[in-house]
Amino acid sequence: MSNAEVLGRFVWHELLTTDTAAAAAFYPKVLPWRTAPSSMPGNTIWMAGQAQIGGLMALPAEAGATPPHWLVYVGTPNVDTTCSQAQGLGAHVVKPPADIPNVGRFAVLSDPQGATFALFTPGAGPPPGAPPAQGGFSWHELATTDVAGALRFYGQLFGWGKGPGHDMGAMGVYQIFMHGGSQVGGMCNVQGPSTAPSWLSYVNVAEASRAVAAAKGAGGRLLHGPMEVPGGSWIAMMMDPQGGAFAVQEAPRAASQKPAAAAKPAAAPKPAAARPAAAPKPAAAPAKPAAAAPSAPVATAAKAVKTVVAAKVAKKAKKAARKVRRAGRKAARKVRRIGRKTARKAARPGVRRAARKVARKTARRVRRGTRQAARGVRRAARRVRRTARRGR
């Protein structure tokens, strides 16, 4: 591959972490990788089959509080020229252009929205072989604060073109970008103000669910998935034990094997400066990942609303029945007081007795009427409760 052909290709991926030994033990359990020694001190090579697909090194001291992360390298015929062009488009230089003996020249930049990436111009050497069927990087996703601005920046810098966009509702548009006529990645909005713009890389695996189980067993954490995306691929996003975010992608599977879809998580943490450990290799052609989110069935929601409303009606009916009973008792007490008062005022004992009798009779009638009214309210309340139970 000539330097002219390397422009805009993802040619290398470097993991910068706080514990290289732990990372070297973790990733081969999850991905079809193995490690190999590097000619550069402090660096380790990631191998997928016979292909070198990335590197591993410790976070440099100047990284400060930057968390472990994967750094993507994009090819260019001339690092210095592209670095100057990127600065003119609003990028910032994190690490100026420098040579790697017998490997090439690189620089690390931060795009106008703050996502970090690296430039790389390969040195003289044999052309890279074909990308591996399993274990190669297949898709690259940029989470950014300005999708349209990022697409303009990278388009002018690397010649990436605008592909189809997928409306993700509240999450915004998932914008595919093209290189050489192929879809190679996507851009989307960062999820939440505390999430920094960053790149997330996907690795081809035979089975996403198996990779997830292996990652969990080795101390990693599942961020999202596995889920099916447009085109039939299955993806899952994870974090290694030290905090480096990565994703896996499985080719479309048979319909009978499809699990339920899940919602998409936030993007990976912001990367920082790094350097490639050996001659980089191009990434494999990707399928197209995107997020999907299931919604609750409408019928279930309607039943839930109906049940809640019926319960509220029943509660109000019970309260009304209590009020009717209290009013009846109060009226009966008042009638009895009036009867006693009238009896006391009567001059003869016979008149007093008659007055008391009338008062008692009237009070009984009031109580009977009150009880009947209360029973009517209770019956109505029972009917409402039965309706509510049927609604469930």
Image: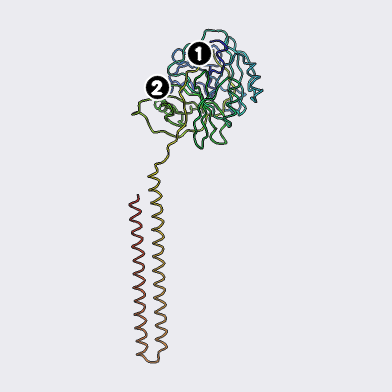
User: Against 1, is 308 above or below?
Assistant: below
Image position, residue 309 (x, y; %): 41, 54
User: Residue at the bottom extreme?
Assistant: 348
User: Against 49, is 390 above or below?
Assistant: below
Disc 1: CA contacts within 10 A as few (<14), some (14-19) or many (>=20):
few
Q: Which residue is mark 1?
A: 37
Disc 2 to disc 1, C-alpha distance? 26 Å
Q: Quadrant of residue 96?
A: top right
Q: Earlier in the sequence, mark 2 or mark 1?
A: 1
Image position, residue 230 (x, y; %): 44, 28
Residue ID at (63%, 23%)? 94
Name the side, left or right, on which 183 lies relative to 380.
Answer: right
The foreground one among 113 and 104 is 113
Q: Which residue is mark 2?
A: 206
Residue 314 is labelled as none
Q: Quadrant of residue 323?
A: bottom left
Give the foreground label among 2 and 1: 2
Label 2: state its secondary structure.
loop
Residue ID at (48%, 28%)? 239
Residue ID at (62%, 27%)? 112
Image position, residue 22 (x, y; %): 49, 23
Residue ID at (36%, 64%)? 377
The foreground one among 257 and 349 is 257
What's the image's color scheme? Answer: rainbow
